[in-house]
Image (cartoon, rainbow, N blue to C red):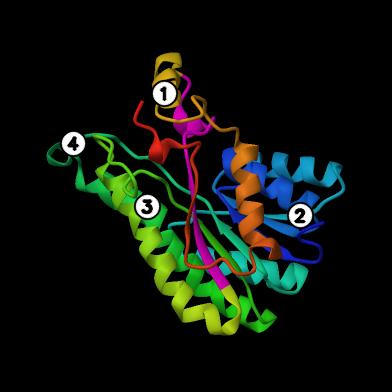
Amino acid sequence: MLLTDKVAIVTGASSGIGAAAASLFAAEGARVVLAARRKDLLDQVAEDILTAGGDVTVVAGDVRSQSYAKVVVDHAVETFGGLDVAFNNAGTLGDTSPIPDMSPENWRNVLDVNLTSAFYAAKYQIPAMVRRGGGSLIFTSTFVGHTVGLPGMGAYAASKAGLIGLTQVLATELGSVGIRVNSLLPGGTHTAMAGSDPDRHASIRSLHALKRMAEPEEIARAALFLASDMASFVTGSAMLADGGNSISKV
């Protein structure tokens, strides 16, 4: 198993990519801390992991809160003895509108959830990983704002592009202490964020070279690679798992 005896935090773990990654990490031997707002959904993910024989604990809260970021790391250390992997996956699309029409409240909320939360997470996760002698820090970014711009997604693109810059700086700061830092850039994925409108899904599928959307488990496998020693020489990367979205023009 790829994560035997590792302790992993997964944020946004109540559904979608986060829930799939938490289940996969646990199946690969990790002791997993689930973090998100919706405790009822976190408890269901945890129950499924426990039923499958995994080791898991839950800390519900708001990733926009600095104190919550500290609580999650403290809980990982107190419950499982340390921290080796953090998959900072929580995110929001926000309201999609042209910048002149976008409310400042929407702009601030999207950046708080997607980018500032990553700063808070890293602030407390890094010292815990240093004490373990290394680790893997992963942020969920996106192709939007990296390889393509989509109308109405100014706040989302800015926040997710910011994660890539943060990744690069942290990778240079932390390489000497054995901490790898990477961003994972999924393509269109069957999650709540993608909605349920068939026409929207058809449009999303058409953007990809594979002409389909990903399942959350497919993106989770890419996160597992970055979390594991299989990626021992991978740091500072913006790793695309986008079904060829970035290179598709037809």
Q: Amino acid at mark 2?
A: Val
Say whether residue 125 is left or right of residue 34. left
Mark 1 = which residue? 206
Q: Could you say which is closer to the camera, residue 58 or residue 5? A: 5
Mark 3 = which residue? 160
Rendered position, 89 above or below 51: below
* Of pointers 3 and 4, the one earlier in the residue sequence: 4
Residue at position x 60%, y 46% from top? 18
| Quarter of the picture holding the N terminus | bottom right
Q: Which residues are magenta?
A: 180-196
Mark 2 = which residue? 56
Say whether residue 37 is left or right of residue 20. left
Question: Marks 2 and 4, Cα distance to the nearest angstrom?
Answer: 42 Å
* Secondary structure type for disc 2: strand
Q: Position of residue 133 (x, y in %)?
A: 67, 82
Residue extending farthest to the top is: 198
Q: Position of residue 106 (x, y in %)?
A: 27, 44
Q: Is the Cβ of the residue at disc 1 closer than 8 Å to that at disc 3?
A: no
Density class for disc 3 (Cα within 10 Å; few <14, some 14-19, many ≥20) is: many
Q: Amino acid at mark 1?
A: Ser
Mark 4 = which residue? 98
Q: Amino acid at mark 4?
A: Pro
Question: Marks 1 and 2, Cα distance to the nearest angstrom?
Answer: 38 Å
